[in-house]
Amino acid sequence: MTPTGSLSNLKVIDASRVLGGPYCGQILADHGADVIKLEPPAGDETRGWGPPFLDGAASYFQGLNRNKRGIAVDISQPAGRTLLLELLADADVFLENFKTGTLERWGLGTEELQARFPKLVHCRVSGFGADGPKGGLPGYDAAIQAVCGIMSVNGERGGDATRVGLPVVDMVTGLNAALGVCMALNERATSGRGQFIETTLYDCGVSLLHPHLPNYYLSGKVAGTTGNAHPNICPYDTYQTKTAPLFLTVGNNRQFVKLCEGIGNPALATDPRFASNADRLNNADALKVELETAMAAFDCGPLSEKLIRMGVPCGAVRTIDEVVADPHTTHREMIVDIGAYRGTGSPIKLSRTPVSYHSAPPRFAQHTAEVMAEHGLDLETYRDVLPGLDPVDTPEKA
């Protein structure tokens, strides 16, 4: 199938593993880029991060690698590095997350690649970057959440620092990498030259500390755990109804008036303790008592529907299966089915060049022969550095 989309003129060699880099590659692939996922002999380790498994690869891998073609090359060997250079000859983007210094030791560092392929956009995802006090150190999402202070502001009020329950740093790093690639490609259209992009987990983790860093810059106060409450907005928290908790995100006085009307206590909006956001923030505990007293008369689901249609931002606290079953999730095309594969759709909706989904994540080395033939490369010449050509030579799980 010929890819369509806003990036259908691009070829990407994705030699990254785990999450941030592969997520970047999937974003580019979903929007039409020809992304060739290049794996080491042992495969991307997330193939084994299960159960559950589909076709021998864990769901973790399945969630980050659709629309890609898969090959496996041992680039620790000279012949493998020669093959990589052949693949990069007509590539627009090289995406990787090798440990700092690895490519340089192999003679494939930034300077060497830019000299050989001046139009190539080379994007590296790393833990801390190549230099500085922590330069070259490895990084994983949870450790970066800890080091960057994200955990320190996440958790029950006065309780222990807690990891955010999804790999938010990795995901944002992948998203920023994709953004950087598109920026570099746009600039290349003017200059005719590629460039090196480095997107680090550390930088992305620090960038997520809003509004805590701006608050600290102005006040000097160090934020701590606040549970679900917001440090700058009130009411912005979970509030118990008759049946289940409801999250309110009331950002202005007009919404607060609507909220008070919706829960049958319009007089609350004229209480001087709650006249402005600053007042409500200073009296957050008292406001929570007042709101929950009124909301105790309502079932969560109907109240949530009523309030949001009145213009009050809110949401019932739902489980994953409830999100999947929501007709709006289907309407927004956020579930993708390709044969036995089911994945999460792209949140980026373009009107003229929409996203497309044409292939499930590749099996290990599934497209090696196809890619080699396209580049006029002889399989036998490189067989020793092409694991997976023999079906028994795969890292996938039964």
Image (cartoon, rainbow, N blue to C red):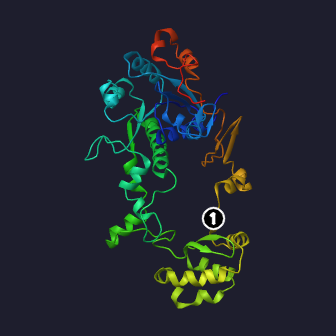
How far across and down, in percent of the image, does residue 312 sit? 64, 73
- Compare residues 358 and 39 and report the one nearer the observer: 39
Residue at image point 59% right, 40% down: 51
Residue 162 on image: x %, y %: 45, 60
| SS at badge 1 | loop
Residue 54 or 268: which is nearer the viewer?
A: 54
- Whether residue 363 can be seen here: yes
Q: How many labels were placed on the picture?
A: 1
Would you say 374 lies left or right of 131 here? Answer: right
Q: Residue 289 appears in which quarter of the rendering?
A: bottom right
* Quadrant of the snapshot with the N terminus: top right
Asked if residue 211 is positioned above or below residue 175 in the image, the reply reads below
Q: What residue does disc 1 label? A: 317
Determine the image quadrant of residue 254.
bottom right
Measured along the vertical axis of the image, is residue 190 above or below residue 39? below
Above or below, 393 relative to 228 = above
Quadrant for the C terminus, please: top right
- The residue positioned 39% from the left and 50% from the top of the image is 143
Query: Are there few (<14), some (14-19), or many (20+) residues within 10 Å of tag 1?
Result: few
Rendering coords of residue 148 (x, y %): 37, 55
Most extreme residue toward the left, as rendered? 133
Q: Quick check: can you spot residue 276?
A: no
Residue 154 pos. (x, y %): 45, 63
| Picture layout, residue 305 above or below residue 140 | below
Q: Residue at x 46, y 37 (%)?
A: 185
Quadrant for residue 336, please give it. top right
Viewer-proximal residue among 338 and 312:
338
- The amino acid at mark 1 is Val
